[in-house]
Image: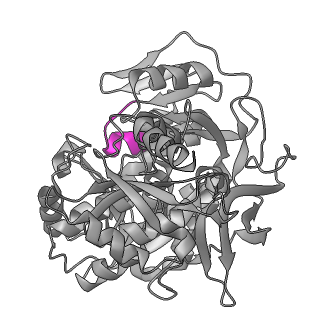
């Protein structure tokens, strides 16, 4: 990660780099502290980070990079079983906790590819977390391209809201901000109202952002909705990136009407977080922006393909390039599984996931994310999951924003924006999808299989009705 350290060295040593609950570090002190921690590490270590958000997390992350050790962030939203799975699969040899550095007695996984600097575990939409092995220079390249896209106006106060174990905050947030010379505010999650990550205190978050005069931050769509509900007055905020899962175009429009400078982006863990990004200078609503400077992006049979991603391989020993094609050599094209297109001006739009496509009994191919986006554009609907594969019509599981929300009116309004074959003919109101109950990933993506299985009785009930009618 020499590029990141070289950029950090360019900033005035007296400038404030990191601000936590009780500690702060100038750029000069940051480098010295990272070197001190790196001296305790070695290239044969696999270092697990089990820390709350704060400067200590960043210092150990950078120290691992400086020492050539492999860093494995341990997400706070993982279950104990998932965390044990991660530690065992990666062969984490040492773990940093609030009590310090401890040995695990494990040996590094033999499947860690040479050159791996970080292993990020995607919470995924199904199954156990999957270890994605990423290169140091690749991650630095992503951060550098973000700085290049945003330009000198990006320099200011950045607030880390998402857990640092999420690549989007770790790389796109912290690395990019440090490269640019920002002051990165990294309070503990409790300090900004996230002591309960499943019931955030958005009023407290808004107050904290205003007090710190925050200029930039990153949110996932669900957190953006919560912040918008507070109608915050944030005069210093200049750039609020939103990514991690699909966002309804209407949400961006309403957010901007409230004065929130929201810009949508798109990325994948295998590409080091961000692939494309809207920015104040280049923005097209409804798109996820233009690809970053280092990204080579194309569309093959409707699927987004990235050439030379940051991915070195997976911890199961494979170098599967996205699942749509057989395994390919490292450095080859990565088939993302995302459906989309690129317009004549270079802006990328994502319509859904290839593996999620529904084929109705009338032979219509429908991306559920497209229909869900229309539903989520309605202010009455907080969450939506559409199904109907092999059926004559589409149905939906819906979570209203409140008990009194007129969901039927919202569905009717959404249907007017959809062709007849893609309209919702039946819906069920269900409890919220959450990370806590396993129905959502840490970045806000619904676990479709888990949700469908949990509400199978609703789906089966309608299937039986169809069969009775046909009989």
- Magenta part of the chain: 50-59
Residue 36 image position (x, y, % from top left): 44, 36
Q: Which residue is at a point 34% across and 51% down the rendered structure image? A: 428
Q: Which residue is at a point 29% across and 46% down the rendered structure image? A: 432
Tell me, yes or no, if residue 33 can be seen here: no
| 109 and 346: which is toward the camera | 346
Residue 258 image position (x, y, % from top left): 22, 81
Left or right: 110, with 470 as reference point: right
| 366 and 141: which is toward the camera | 366
Left or right: 362, with 436 as reference point: right
Residue 42 image position (x, y, % from top left): 60, 27
Q: Which residue is at a point 68% across and 39% down the rendered structure image? A: 116
Quadrant location of residue 415?
A: bottom left
**Residue with the most extreme front position:** 471
Task: Name the image quarter holding the C terminus.
Answer: top right
| 302 and 419: which is toward the camera | 419
| Above/below status of 333 relative to 302 | above
Q: How is the image coloured?
A: one colour
């Amino acid at each position: 990660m020499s590029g990141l350290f070289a950029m950090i060295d360019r900033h005035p040593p007296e400038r404030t780099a990191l601000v936590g609950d009780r500690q702060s570090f100038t750029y000069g002190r940051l480098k010295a502290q990272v070197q001190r921690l790196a001296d305790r590490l070695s290239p044969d270590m696999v270092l697990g980070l089990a820390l709350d958000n704060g400067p200590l997390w960043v210092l150990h992350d950078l120290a691992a990079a400086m020492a050539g050790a492999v860093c494995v962030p341990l997400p706070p939203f993982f279950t104990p079983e998932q965390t044990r799975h991660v530690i065992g699969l990666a062969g984490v040899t040492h773990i940093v906790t609030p009590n310090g550095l401890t040995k695990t007695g494990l040996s590094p996984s033999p499947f860690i590819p040479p050159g791996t600097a970080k292993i990020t575990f995607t919470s995924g939409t199904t199954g156990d977390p999957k270890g994605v092995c990423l290169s140091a220079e690749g991650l630095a390249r992503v951060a550098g391209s973000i700085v290049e896209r945003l330009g000198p106006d990006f320099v200011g106060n950045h607030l880390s809201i998402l857990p640092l174990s999420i690549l989007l905050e770790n790389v796109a947030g912290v690395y990019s901000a440090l490269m640019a010379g920002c002051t990165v505010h990294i309070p503990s999650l409790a300090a900004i109202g996230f002591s309960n990550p499943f019931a955030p205190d958005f009023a407290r978050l808004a107050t904290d952002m205003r007090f710190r005069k925050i200029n930039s931050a990153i949110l996932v769509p669900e957190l953006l909705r919560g912040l918008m509900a507070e109608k915050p007055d944030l005069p210093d905020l200049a750039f609020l990136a939103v990514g991690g899962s699909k966002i309804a175009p209407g949400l961006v429009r309403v957010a901007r009407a409230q004065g929130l400078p929201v810009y949508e982006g798109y990325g994948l863990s295998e590409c080091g977080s961000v692939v494309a990004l809207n920015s104040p200078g280049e923005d097209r609503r409804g798109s996820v922006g233009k690809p970053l400077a280092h990204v080579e992006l194309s569309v093959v049979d409707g699927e987004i393909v990235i050439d030379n991603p940051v991915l070195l391989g997976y911890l199961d020993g494979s170098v599967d390039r996205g699942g749509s094609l057989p395994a390919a050599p490292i450095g080859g094209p990565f088939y993302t599984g995302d459906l989309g297109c690129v317009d004549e001006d270079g802006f990328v739009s994502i319509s859904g996931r290839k593996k999620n496509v529904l084929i109705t009994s009338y032979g219509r191919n429908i991306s559920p994310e497209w229909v869900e986006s229309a539903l989520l554009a309605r202010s009455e609907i907080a969450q939506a999951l559409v199904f109907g594969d092999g059926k004559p019509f589409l149905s939906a599981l819906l979570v209203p924003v409140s008990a009194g929300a007129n969901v039927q009116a919202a569905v009717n309004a959404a249907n007017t924006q959809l062709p007849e074959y893609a309209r919702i003919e039946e819906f069920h109101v269900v409890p919220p999808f959450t990370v806590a109950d396993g129905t959502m990933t840490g970045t806000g993506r619904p676990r479709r299989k888990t949700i469908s299985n949990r509400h199978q009785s609703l789906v089966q009930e309608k299937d039986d009705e169809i069969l009775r009618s046909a009989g």
